[in-house]
Amino acid sequence: MIIGPFLPAYSRILPQSADYVRVLPEIVLSIFGMIVMVLEPLIDEKKSQKVLGGIALAGALAGLMATWLMAQSPGMAFWNTVQIDGFSVFFHVLVTAIAAVVILTSYEYMSVQRIRAGEYYALILFGAVGMALMSSAIELVLIFIALEISSISSYVLAGFRRREASSAEASLKYFLLGSFATAFFLYGVALMFGATGSTNIDQIGKTLLAGPIPLLAFAAMAFMFVGLGFKVAAAPFHVWTPDVYEGSPAPIVGFMSTAPKAAAFAVLLRIVFVINVPGKFWLIWISAALSMTLGNVGALVQNNVKRLLAYSSIAHAGYLLVAFAASPGLGTSAAMFYTAAYAAMNLGAFAVVSHFANAGERYVNLEDYEGLGRSSPLLAAALTIFLLSLIGIPMTGGFFAKFYVFSAAVKANMIWLTIIGVLNSGIGAYYYLRIIVAMYMRESRRDVPVAPVPTALAVAIAFCMAATLYLGIFPGETLRYAQDSAQQLVQQAPPEAPAAAPVATIPATL
Amino acid sequence: MSIDNLSSIILTLVTFLPLAGGLLLILFPRRDRDIRIFALVISLLTFAVSLHLPVHFQRSHTEFQYQIDLQWVTTPNIHYHMGIDGISLWLVVLTTFLTPLCVLISWNSIHERAKEFFILLLILETALIGVFTSLDLFLFYFFWEATLIPMALLIGIFGHERKVYAAVKFFMYTMIGSVFMLAAILWLYAHTGSFDFVVIRDQVMRGAVPQFPAAAQWLFLGFFLAFAVKVPLFPFHTWLPDAHVEAPTAGSVLLAGVMLKMGTYGMLRFNLGLFPEQSRHNAGWIMTLALIGIIYGALVAMVQPNMKKLIAYSSVSHLGFVVLGIFSFTQAGLNGAMFVMLAHGISTGGLFMLAGILHERRHTYEISEFGGLASVMPVYAASYLAIVLASAGLPLMNGFIGEFLVLSGAFQARAAYGILAATGVIWSAVYLLWMYQRVFYGKVTHPVNNSLRDLSAIEKIAVWPCAGLALLMGVAPIVWLGAIDPAVQAALTPLTRVASRMVGR
């Protein structure tokens, strides 16, 4: 009774229903994850794979639907800590779709590797919660929490091939270095709070824009970049990548190399373009150039396909970073498109790799791929398309992704970075080509058994392939969406340098 | 359907018909005979449809014809813009003419994975035609890169002993060359807001592109490098002999016949079209490289013990003529360059087919393995002679017309260039006739050669059109030059304007 008069005040303190809608995907994913955890000990171990995986898949699909609901009510939630806009919806869709595809690829993998563990699927869902939240959080502390949620599930997932020493090594390495990196991020957050008195990204941006920039802000920016640079495997924070990718279960590598990366890039996009710290340009420039070069050069000499793709993912992080050095609007949309295209092609590639790998991941070396074009033509053709997309050949998503990124870079007049980039993508073609060469142009020397493709995996590969080709032939729709949401995102950002495009209308006879 | 309606979609039809055929072929069961026949039907159909282009071509018009311009992606502003003028017209027809011959020549030589072979061949045809028909720089780059994959796979899967090395080398050379072009295209887009060749050219001509004078030299080089690798201009030619020797016959035919022309076509269209001033400035060293290519290619060809390598190096020499003609900036030189492109496509395509026929019987390309074949394979020898003479530039054959025009253009530009290039004609006669003599005349030195079969019916159908056309082009060049001449004149206009401005200063 007494509460009555205070209701208005309470309503300001208590979350509204709209607040919950704006984190609905996270809630749905968490609930499904918990269901999996609860059911896991109750179900017969032999049947558990199918059932738990099915529930997890249903969870991811429900998460997609929840994202659709969430998209209907854009705005702030939970006292301006979460912002739902086109940008965060984009990454929500991306992350949950990736989770769904990974769950599909894991079915077969788990039974072939004889890993019986329901928490595997739960961890994928929990990881997705963290990554989704990373893309919508605009409060640095919340971002940190989301980052931790996503990282901790990745650490555990990396170690799931329990019988393998390399998997344990991967998990431990990832965990130790990862915690170190998140500590850097947290340190950066603290310094930023010290410099501006706020942990809200918008607020920080406004403060920095209004007055002279305190020295502390530069350090804060650098620290945060270290933390996020680690997560996206950008050089010089990339050293962990090959070992971790080599040891982790193949479907999980597909997951780790796409979803957390996309989420970390989302955070980086918000931080880089909304918090306008001068000097970040060179930070990104150097990191991008280093990542592209080290990634591609490192990949040239790899014989293990997983390691090769690990170096390739470093190189792709570099291409993506090029977009960050461009102007906010173009850069953001190019980066968004790139994360989507990269997710489609890389997940597809890892889906095929995890099928070929067989029990104990015996067949992951280049020699094992020899003659596959003949023995399993469809899978080889699928892998070829994904690899061509990674090279950046027309008709595939990878081509347009690179194209937009470099186009944005040239528009921002970064000719040198563009040249380093295009040259790298030329060199990079070589190592992807080695896999294609092995599959089609060499005769098999070893007897590599290839099991028939189960339905779930076929669906996953077909989906990735459809996405790769769709982004390669009809990129317009996705790109327009990315541009619209980038526009919303950068509204509060400092005005973009005047783009060169309108020059076309200047009468020439002046 | 009326002619007007057809004309608006004809380029799309010609370009994508082979691709559609290739995709349909995927559904075919693995019965090689059906697959071959279907591939032949599709490629012949494409050729028939492509004949619409020269028949209804307005020879007096210099602007692009059969244009189609649709928005593909709004931002960035990418158009599906296709159109041809007298320069690209014949290159398209050359492609559609050579592809059915490639199918025929592979009729019996491809036993394994025939389905993949013909699918790749048809996809390659689409990509090659697309390069010549697209007027949007993005679309152009798209097709340009798209030619790489099927060709690399053709070499790598169906080639000879060192196929993998050759395929990867081919791929990497072209890929790394073309990324510089991509950078240049992106720059142009960033500063003009368009990928459309016509729009960009007009803006460049009006001087409406900001910062253009400072960047133009780099842009010119970006484009030029990609094209020079493809031509291949000395010293970027080292991938060519490897690729040719290892490639299957059909691959060599399309590689020499059409793919090399992508480079010279690109120079003519984009380097001259967009950067007339820089073309003038750089012409000196480019012509020098072309001359080195002519003479060096011929000398190296002369000492080759391997027939296919000899033909490959002769391509380096012939393509040197093309580049020389283009950068002579004279009407005759450009006409000649265009004509050499076509003539080389026909005659070298024919030579590669003939070499392939021999390889099929003896599994070797070594010239020393043969001798006295004229008595064993008279029809083969006669066909070979016709095409060798065409390639060597005998008057009344197509090689002569082109080389004569190029040389007269080079003389107009600078006499020394003309004189040096003229020696190339002599060299080509030397290496080709000497090779012919060693293979066909004298006594049969190896007993195995006594039992060689003469040309089969299918092989005759594949080779004779080349020989016939070589003669026809030599006798009535005006049929081809009639369309080429106005287009070349239009391409030269900005260059003469630049020249007069430079003289005025």
Image (cartoon, rainbow, N blue to C red):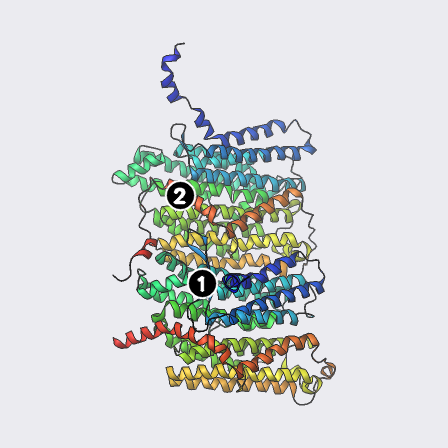
Find residue B400 and report its horizontal and vertical position in percent: 51, 84
Residue sitting at x 38%, y 43%: A487
The residue indicated by pointer 2 is A486
Q: Residues within 10 Å of mark 1 (few under 14, many from 20)?
A: many
- Return the residue nearer the eye: A409 or B143: B143
Q: Which chain letter goes with mark 2?
A: A
Circles 2, 1 touching at the beta carbon (< 8 Å)? no
**Could you say which disc has been placed on residue B135 in the image?**
1
Find residue A222 and report its horizontal and vertical position in percent: 36, 43
- Return the residue nearer the eye: A47 or A467: A467
- Residue A368 versus residue A198 in the image, above or below: below
Identity, as a three-letter code, of the amino acid under mark 2: Ala
Find residue A79 and report its horizontal and vertical position in percent: 38, 27
- Return the residue nearer the eye: B331 or B365: B331
Find residue B116 and report its horizontal and vertical position in percent: 64, 61
- Residue B20 versus residue A229 in the image, above or below: below
> Along the horizontal axis of the image, is A286 left or right of A53?
left
Q: Quadrant of the C terminus of chain A?
A: bottom left
Q: Quadrant of the N terminus of chain A?
A: top left
Q: Of tags 2 and 1, which is closer to the observer?
A: 1
Residue B320 shows up from this direction: no
Q: Seen from this angle, which residue lies furthest top?
A: A1
Identity, as a three-letter code, of the amino acid under mark 1: Leu
